[in-house]
Amino acid sequence: KQEVTQIPAALSVPEGENLVLNCSFTDSAIYNLQWFRQDPGKGLTSLLLIQSSQREQTSGRLNASLDKSSGRSTLYIAASQPGDSATYLCAPLSGNTGKLIFGQGTTLQVKP
Amino acid sequence: EAQVTQNPRYLITVTGKKLTVTCSQNMNHEYMSWYRQDPGLGLRQIYYSMNVEVTDKGDVPEGYKVSRKEKRNFPLILESPSPNQTSLYFCASSLYGGSTDTQYFGPGTRLTVL
């Protein structure tokens, strides 16, 4: 059974810092991994999708890497801004039913 | 605008009163699914649908029903809601639910069952 862990659970940093959010999963047989952002009381916004054959994906200040064999993914946020404050969720796609398995998330606060 | 919509966004109801949460997507996606989000438990899949007329259970299907009569709509039905179904519900869709497909989520429906 796939289990997903995200560390740290919460993070508070001053504006401008570069950040690394960690995601680990127990079953390396994944099809892809998606990173999402969730603002309080809001839905999930997809940030990046990394296919199992890829090592990383980039979108603006965000870079996500995937090491399937070790069961790890990282989300790198460059030059953090207060608008980046949110909960970040990682979710590998396991099996052929389209089901995402979510971690508990990392809640990020970026202080001005 | 490409999006997944859900209605209602907020709902307070009483035990046993049947309700339906609607979900609609305008991206011509084959795959749709429902999740619930609870503190400490994260997001868990309730039901999914690979295409029209094909639905199957996810991890926590008890107390829920779904139907997929049209490609764009995937309503979640609670025939007899109970307090343990108080939760934040999300509908999601993707092209085929496959390895290259980004999954898009709706804005969520916050349900309280008294």
Image (tube, coloured by chain):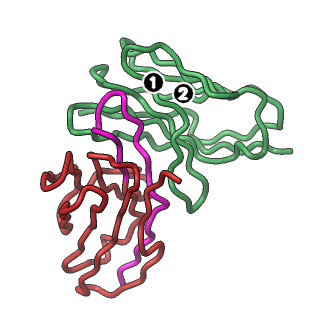
Quadrant where the image shows the C terminus of chain B: bottom left
Q: Is residue B34 above or below residue A27?
A: below
Q: Position of residue A56 (x, y in %)?
A: 52, 17
Which residue is at a point 46% across and 62% down the rendered structure image?
A: B108
Q: Which chain is red in the rendering?
A: B
Tell me which chain the residue with mark 1 is part of.
Answer: A
Q: Earlier in the sequence, mark 2 or mark 1?
A: 2
Q: Name the amino acid, label 2.
A: Asn
User: What colour is chain A?
Assistant: green
Q: Are marks 2 and 1 on the same chain?
A: yes
Q: Name the amino acid, label 1.
A: Ile
Q: Which residue is label 1 attached to? A: A50
Label 1: few (<14), some (14–19) or many (≥20) C-alpha neighbours in 10 Å = many
Which residue is at a point 50% across and 50% down the rendered structure image?
A: A44
Which residue is at a point 36% across and 58% down the rendered structure image?
A: B36
- Please indicate whether residue A31 sits to the left or right of residue B80 in the image: right
Q: Position of residue A101 (x, y in %)?
A: 34, 39
Tell me which chain the residue with mark 2 is part of.
Answer: A
